[in-house]
Every structure is written in structure tokens, then in C-alpha cells.
């Protein structure tokens, strides 16, 4: 009897212990406010300035990282190299041809989402080699790829907990990216209806809140990943659109056809080709419209030169659905030289 | 750009965009002084609207919309654009008509894409926002 009680007590202890140990490593996932998104975006943009200028003897760069944070250049050496600690990170930003007016890191397509203990994110980066102020010096895209980030909120503000650079590679076996990210969703914490009808529209009073702007920015920022990396046979690409959406050109209607179209485009787990810029957004009476520039860059691999494949712009109509903001129409228009205006 | 458009030009112009970023909102200090005497922090919507302003300047400059006035009207009445790379000591273009003329020069059009804005940092200043 006593033994039975002891065993029962022990098993309760064991169960209890294993229960807590399973929960322990999981930090709560915070709800990110509009300001959190903006502050993380600003951190990501400061990175370019801090690295290219090497400001404050590299300290400006090191200060973007939390204590014990790491930068990993997966393209350095045969198996990548990791930098940790203030001095090592500062030294990294002192290397190369830095200067107060040097500009090289073009960061775009910033995707952010809450994660246990803070947030994770990813961005495209094009690394330019621009001559001195365009004085006849040859300018080019040197190389590029993507950053995978983990962010943490410190008393000084949002900081990198880790950042890893992956050089763009095409034709690699298609595998999920290191940090799998859910499809975009509404910023509000409310879970919403269990099976929302994605065709329904949430009326819009003709004004956009900060949350609306950010959700639409995040929707557009996810587009290049869904197309270039396409981890799921076009599913995450198609899910950026409303079920009745139309893409042009070629005219493609409906999620199934969109998924098929995306899967025919070149893609790879670390492939970066669609660089977006100048995303502007305007409220309409029943949603929002927006446009942005596209520069499709063929990043040179293994030291080969990079080139611009094409450029142009997208014109979008966005619809707010119970799933969040989605593309209702998206039209690509190739760039064409205009006439000299008088 | 078309495939014939030289990469060098595109990248060179990207520098101009960077310069524009550092200059544009400096004018805002003048404009916001009256309406907002002691702004020391920006709301999320302020930051987003400033971001949109800078992006609109790229569209307005490349399209030359409204005879260049789409670009000029993004500036305050006394706003100025400074091209530090123009001439030996840089050049300042001030006033609505002068700014519109600037946006009419070169090859403009609704499908011209040449200015990329990127890495936009916004900070609150005493009476508006800078950079």
C-alpha cells in the first residue's frame, strides 16, 4: 500500500516535472503593435547606414545588436562565420571601404511577425557597388540575398538577437526557409471567426489606420518570398490574393491558377529576385489601392556579375477580408522610357 | 527601365534618391512649426505618412505628373531640394515653379521607373521630423 502510494506520488511528480519542463523554454508570443512593426523596420533600415558608414568606429553597427547577439555570414568561408560580442561586431563594420557617404546595402521586402520572446523577420538585400557619386565610375549590383532575423525588445528598444545572411542561389532543391512564416494575418489580437468567408469584405470608411498601412505593407513585402522561394507549390503565393482575384500579365484568375503560375516561375529556397520599392498606399471607399516599383535582379552566383532582368511597377487593389488584407487585383506594367517633358 | 537602359544610370540615380531622403523632410520643420509647436514624438501614423511622402516623391519625379507640380506640391511653399552632386558646390532648387521645372526635366512618363527609395529612417525633431 505504502509502496503503491509512493509510486503514485512519484509518478505525479514525474508527470508534473515533465509538464513544466516542456513549457519552460517557450517564451510567450507578444502582440506587436503598429509602433513595434515600425520600430523593427527602422532597426532593419539603420543596419544599412550603420554598416556602410562604419559610424562611431563601428559602434553604431554593434549597438543594433542585443548583448550576446550574433551575425552569421553563411557565405563566408566553407561553412559560414559567426560574429558575437560588441567588439567583433564593431570590427565587422570597420572593414571594407566605409565612409560617411558610402551607400551599398539596399534593404527591402521587410517581413516581420511576432514569435516567442519577440519577433522574427526576413528581408532582401541587394549589395551595390556604386562609384563615387556617379562621376563616370562604373556602378553595379555586386551581390545579394536575404537576411533571416530574430528581434528582441530590450530596455533600449528593439535589437537584433541574431541575423544571418544567405547569398541568393537559384536552382537549389526547393526546401522550406529556415524560419517558416505563417501567411499574413490581421494585426489585431482577436482570432476572428473560425471559418471566415474570405470573399466577404470588411467595409472601409475611406481612411486607413496605422494598422491597415502596416498590414498592406506586410502583404506586399511577402509577395517576393512567395514567388522566389515558393516553399509550398504556390500555396502561400495564392493565399496573398482574394479567391476572386485577377493578376495581369498574363491574366490569371483564381487561387488555383495563381498557384500554378507561381510554380512555373524560377524559384529556390534561397532565391531572391523580386526587389520592391516605393510602395505607396491610398484609401478608397471600399478598400485601398497602391503601387510599387519592381526591379528584378539576377544576382550573380559564385562571383558571376549580377544584372537587372527587368523593371517596372505593380498597380494593386487591396481588399480587407476576415483573413486580413489581400490583393484583389495586381497588374504589372513594364518600365518604358518617357518623352522629354517640356 | 527597359533592357536598353544602362544599369549605371539606374544605380547612379539611386544615389540621388538617397540624397532626396535626407533633404526632403528637412523642409517639414519649417511647415510644421506653425501647426505643431512642440512635437517631440511621432505617432505610428506620422511615421507612415512621412514614409509615404518620401515614396511619393520618387513616383512624382519619374512621372513628371501634372507638369512637374505633383512633385513640387510635396514640398512646403518654401521647401527646397539640394543636389549636392550638381555643379562644383551643389545646387539648391527652391520654390514651387522651380521644383516643378526640375520634375519636368529628363525622360519622364507614367511608366518610367528610375528612383528607388530605400532604408528610410525617420526621427522626431523639435518641431517636425528629420531624415
Image (cartoon, rainbow, N blue to C red):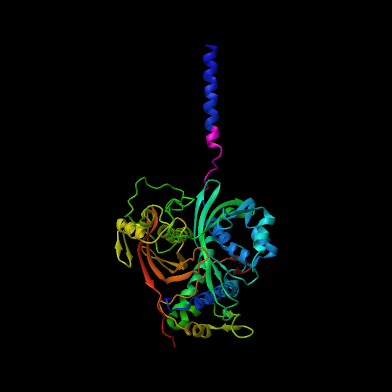
Image quadrant of residue B33? Answer: bottom right
Q: In this rendering, would A298 be left or right of A249?
A: right
- Magenta-colored stretch includes residue A271: no
Query: Looking at the rendering, which quadrant does residue A216 occupy?
Result: bottom left
Front position in the image: A95 or B85? A95
Residue at image x 55%, y 29%?
A: A17
Nearest the viewer among B88 and B36 is B88
Whole-percent x and y of residue A65?
Answer: 62, 55
Q: Residue at (53%, 72%) from the top-left corner?
A: A140
* Up-down relation of residue A106 to residue B82 (above or below): above
Residue A125 in picture, x, y percent from top left: 52, 63
Choose between A236 and A143: the one closer to the eye: A143
Is residue B90 found left or right of A254 in the rendered image? Answer: right
Which quadrant: the N terminus of chain B? Answer: bottom left
Quarter-wise, where is residue A240 in the image? Answer: bottom left
Against A118, residue A212 (above or below) is: below
Work out whether residue B93 can be spotted: yes
- Residue at 52% over, 19% down: A8
A318, above or below B108, in the image: above
Image position of B4 (left or right of B80): left
**Which residues are the magenta region?**
A20-30
Q: Position of residue A61 (x, y in %)?
A: 64, 60
Amino acid at each position: 500500500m505504502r509502496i503503491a502510494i509512493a509510486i503514485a506520488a512519484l509518478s505525479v511528480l514525474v508527470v508534473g516535472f515533465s509538464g513544466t519542463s516542456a513549457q519552460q523554454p517557450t517564451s510567450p508570443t507578444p502582440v506587436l503593435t503598429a509602433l513595434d512593426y515600425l520600430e523593427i523596420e527602422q532597426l532593419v533600415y539603420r543596419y544599412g547606414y550603420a554598416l556602410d558608414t562604419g559610424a562611431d568606429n563601428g559602434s553604431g553597427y554593434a549597438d543594433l545588436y542585443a548583448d550576446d547577439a550574433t551575425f552569421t555570414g553563411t557565405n563566408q568561408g566553407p561553412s559560414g562565420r559567426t560574429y558575437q560580442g560588441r567588439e567583433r561586431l564593431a570590427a565587422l563594420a570597420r572593414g571594407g571601404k566605409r565612409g560617411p557617404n558610402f551607400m551599398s546595402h539596399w534593404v527591402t521586402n521587410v517581413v516581420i511577425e511576432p514569435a516567442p520572446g519577440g519577433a522574427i523577420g526576413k528581408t532582401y538585400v541587394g549589395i551595390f557597388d556604386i562609384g563615387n557619386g556617379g562621376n563616370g565610375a562604373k556602378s553595379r549590383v555586386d551581390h545579394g540575398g536575404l537576411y533571416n532575423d530574430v528581434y528582441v525588445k530590450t530596455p533600449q528598444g528593439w535589437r537584433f538577437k541574431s541575423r544571418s545572411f544567405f547569398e541568393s542561389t537559384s536552382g537549389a532543391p526547393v526546401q522550406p526557409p529556415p524560419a517558416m512564416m505563417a501567411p499574413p494575418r490581421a494585426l489585431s489580437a482577436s482570432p476572428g471567426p473560425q471559418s471566415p468567408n474570405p470573399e466577404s469584405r470588411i467595409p472601409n470608411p475611406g481612411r486607413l489606420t496605422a494598422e491597415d498601412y502596416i498590414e498592406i505593407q506586410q502583404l506586399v513585402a511577402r509577395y517576393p518570398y512567395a514567388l522566389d522561394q515558393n516553399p509550398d507549390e504556390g500555396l502561400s503565393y495564392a493565399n496573398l490574393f482574394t479567391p476572386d482575384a485577377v493578376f495581369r500579365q498574363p491574366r490569371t484568375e483564381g487561387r488555383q491558377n495563381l498557384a500554378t503560375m507561381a510554380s512555373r516561375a524560377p524559384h529556390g529556397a534561397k532565391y531572391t529576385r523580386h526587389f520592391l520599392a516605393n510602395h505607396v498606399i491610398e484609401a478608397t471607399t471600399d478598400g485601398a489601392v497602391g503601387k510599387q516599383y519592381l526591379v528584378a535582379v539576377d544576382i550573380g552566383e559564385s562571383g558571376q556579375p549580377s544584372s537587372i532582368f527587368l523593371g517596372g511597377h505593380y498597380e494593386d487593389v487591396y481588399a480587407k477580408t476576415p483573413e486580413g488584407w489581400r490583393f484583389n487585383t495586381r497588374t504589372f506594367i513594364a518600365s518604358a522610357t518617357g518623352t522629354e517633358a517640356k | 527601365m527597359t533592357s536598353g537602359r544602362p544599369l549605371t544610370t539606374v544605380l547612379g540615380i539611386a544615389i540621388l534618391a538617397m540624397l532626396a531622403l535626407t533633404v526632403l523632410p528637412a523642409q517639414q520643420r519649417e511647415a510644421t512649426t506653425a501647426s505643431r509647436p512642440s512635437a517631440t514624438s511621432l505617432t505610428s501614423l506620422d511615421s507612415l505618412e512621412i514614409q509615404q511622402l518620401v515614396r511619393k516623391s520618387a513616383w512624382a519625379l519619374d512621372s513628371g505628373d501634372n507638369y512637374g507640380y505633383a512633385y513640387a506640391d510635396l514640398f512646403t511653399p518654401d521647401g527646397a531640394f539640394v543636389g549636392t552632386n550638381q555643379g562644383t558646390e551643389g545646387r539648391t532648387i527652391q520654390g514651387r515653379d522651380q521644383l516643378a521645372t526640375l520634375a519636368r526635366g529628363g525622360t519622364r512618363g507614367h511608366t518610367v521607373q528610375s528612383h528607388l527609395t530605400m532604408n528610410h529612417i525617420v526621427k522626431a525633431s523639435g518641431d517636425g521630423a528629420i531624415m
